[in-house]
Structures are given as structure tokens and as C-alpha cells.
Image: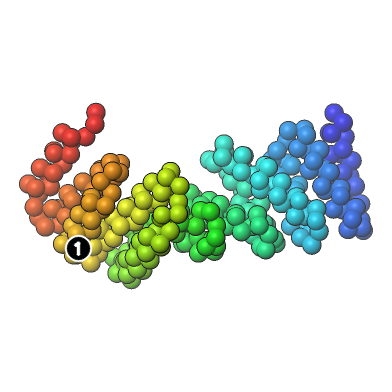
């Protein structure tokens, strides 16, 4: 009840004309804190975000955006990704952070979160641009480079035929760059992280195979990539369905429908039940 009174008092005070900057800032901050204690996370997040947006030159503004993004935004979004209200609150806070506080450590770390948000929303063009802003020293830099490729792959897959060739060239170049990057950094990673990035690299290489099959019409190159992935990543059995699908697609492109059917039947026999 006491925190509710604080919110009402703060709301009334913010309507008073010609408030000094210090009073405005402190009123908004304690209003957000009271809403937080009332367990009204959405309202608190909105209050802290507005404070941060309006007063980026204050210490309270930086504190407020940290609370909005880290304390409130990430947990809310993790449990409510499909809720439009939560989506809007979260992305608004991220944008304020990146636009108004770009030189803070939190903003640098959150470049990846914003790009991942765009990818989850299938906003692939914007996601590619956002992934390009993830700094090289970011803990998730390798993941960002792969997920950027995945977005390019989605754009390529959805593009009209007349645009696919240009997109394919960009995608092939990006996969080659990612392959070199991973080769240079893989040995420094923890075992768990190494497995994750190896799987990303394998999937990136298989993107190349898809391009060779569907756009450049080079089934031999596609098969060479598939053979390389099979050899280099034989321990990653989760790749088997995708590899099988690509092999079948090669047979289909070559009008070898009997072999395509045989490959599918063999996979079905070997697949775990």
C-alpha cells in the first residue's frame, strides 16, 4: 500500500509544470522503484526506460536503463517472448540503451541481444545489420557471425529467383570468412563452447552445399562440401538429417529419383526410433 501511494504521488508530481531536472529524474527513479516493489515489472520497466531516454546525461539514466534491460527486460522476455506487450517493452529498452548509451559496457554486450531479438522475429535484413555491430571482443562474437549467416541464408531462401545469384555470392563469401575465423579461434574455447561452434560451422558449410544445389547448379561442389562435413564432423550425429536431405536433393536435381528414394529409405531404416 505504501508503495502504491509513492506511485500516485510521483504521478501527480510529474504533471506539475516546470519541474527542475533533478526533481524530475529522482521522481521517475523512485516511481520505478516503487512499481518494482509492487511487483508491477512491466510498469517499472516502462518508467525506467522513459527516464533513461529522457535523461541520458545523468547517472540515474544509466542506472535506470540497466534495471530496465537486465533486471527486468531479460527475465520478462525469456518467459514471455510471444507476448506483444513484453516484446515492445524489451525492444524499446534495448533501443534506448544502444541509441542513448552506446559507449557503455552494457550496450556493447547488448548488441548481440538486439540482433538475436530481430532474428527471432524473422526480421532478417535488420538482424544482419545488427549482427555486424557486435564487437569482436564480445563473448558471443562467433555465435553472432554464424547467426548472421543463418539470416543471410533465410533471405536467400526467400528471395525471388532473379535475386538469388547475388545473395548466393555474398553467402558463399560469408561462410568462407566464418570458416577461417573459427579455425583461428576454436582452440581457445572451452569443450562445451567448442562443440557448439563446431556445430555452427558445420551448418554454415552445409549452407554452401544448399547454394551449390539450388542456385549455382553445381551438384559436384555440393557433394564435395557434404563429404567434407561428414569427415570433419563425424561426431555430430545431429547433422545426419540435414546431410541426408541435401543428398536426396542432389539426386532429385539430377533426375535420379530412384537413388533419392533409396537414400531416404536407408535413412529411415537407420534413424533412431
Q: Quadrant of the C terminus?
A: top left
**Element type where label 1 sits in the image:** helix
User: Can residue 4 be seen in this snapshot?
Assistant: yes
Q: Nearer the viewer, residue 79 or 18?
A: 79
Residue under pointer 1 = 221
The image shows residue 54 at horizontal and vertical percentages of: 77, 58
Q: Nearer the viewer, residue 195 or 50?
A: 195
Residue positioned 89% across, 55% down in the render: 22
Q: What colour scheme does the image use?
A: rainbow
Residue positioned 76% across, 51% down in the render: 63
Residue positioned 50% across, 60% down in the render: 131
Q: Nearer the viewer, residue 58 or 261?
A: 58
The image shows residue 190 at horizontal and vertical percentages of: 45, 47
Q: Quadrant of the N terminus?
A: top right
Name the side, left or right, on which 67 lies relative to 4.
left
From this view, report whether residue 99 is shown above or below residue 2.
below
> Badge 1: how crowded within 10 Å, few (<14), some, or many (20+)?
some
From this view, report whether residue 146 is shown above or below residue 196.
below
Residue positioned 66% across, 48% down in the render: 69
The image shows residue 211 at horizontal and vertical percentages of: 27, 61
Name the side, left or right, on which 42 lies relative to 176.
right
Q: Nearer the viewer, residue 9 or 145?
A: 145
User: Can residue 129 be seen in this snapshot?
Assistant: no
The image shows residue 239 at horizontal and vertical percentages of: 29, 45
Amino acid at each position: 500500500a505504501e508503495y502504491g501511494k509513492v506511485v500516485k504521488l510521483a504521478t501527480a508530481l510529474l504533471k506539475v509544470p516546470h519541474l527542475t531536472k533533478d526533481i524530475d529524474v529522482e521522481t521517475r527513479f523512485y516511481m520505478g522503484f516503487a512499481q518494482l516493489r509492487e511487483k508491477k515489472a512491466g510498469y517499472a520497466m516502462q518508467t525506467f526506460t522513459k527516464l533513461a531516454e529522457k535523461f541520458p546525461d545523468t547517472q540515474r539514466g544509466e542506472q535506470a536503463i540497466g534495471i530496465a534491460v537486465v533486471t527486468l527486460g531479460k527475465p520478462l522476455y525469456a518467459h514471455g517472448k510471444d507476448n506483444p506487450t513484453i516484446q515492445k517493452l524489451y525492444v524499446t529498452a534495448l533501443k534506448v540503451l544502444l541509441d542513448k548509451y552506446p559507449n557503455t559496457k552494457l550496450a556493447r554486450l547488448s548488441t548481440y541481444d538486439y540482433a538475436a531479438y530481430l532474428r527471432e522475429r524473422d526480421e532478417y535484413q535488420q538482424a544482419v545489420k545488427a549482427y555486424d555491430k557486435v564487437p569482436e571482443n564480445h563473448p558471443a562474437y562467433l555465435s553472432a557471425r554464424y547467426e548472421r549467416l543463418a539470416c543471410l541464408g533465410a533471405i536467400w531462401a526467400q528471395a525471388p529467383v532473379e535475386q538469388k545469384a547475388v545473395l548466393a555470392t555474398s553467402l558463399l563469401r560469408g561462410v568462407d570468412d566464418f570458416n577461417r575465423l573459427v579455425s583461428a579461434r576454436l582452440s581457445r574455447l572451452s569443450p562445451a563452447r567448442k562443440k557448439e561452434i563446431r556445430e555452427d560451422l558445420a551448418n554454415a558449410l552445409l549452407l554452401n552445399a544448399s547454394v551449390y544445389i539450388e542456385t549455382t547448379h553445381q551438384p559436384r561442389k555440393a557433394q564435395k562440401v557434404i563429404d567434407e562435413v561428414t569427415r570433419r564432423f563425424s561426431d555430430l550425429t545431429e547433422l545426419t538429417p540435414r546431410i541426408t536431405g541435401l543428398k536426396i536433393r542432389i539426386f532429385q536435381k539430377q533426375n535420379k529419383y530412384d537413388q533419392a528414394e533409396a537414400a531416404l529409405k536407408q535413412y529411415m531404416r537407420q534413424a533412431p526410433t
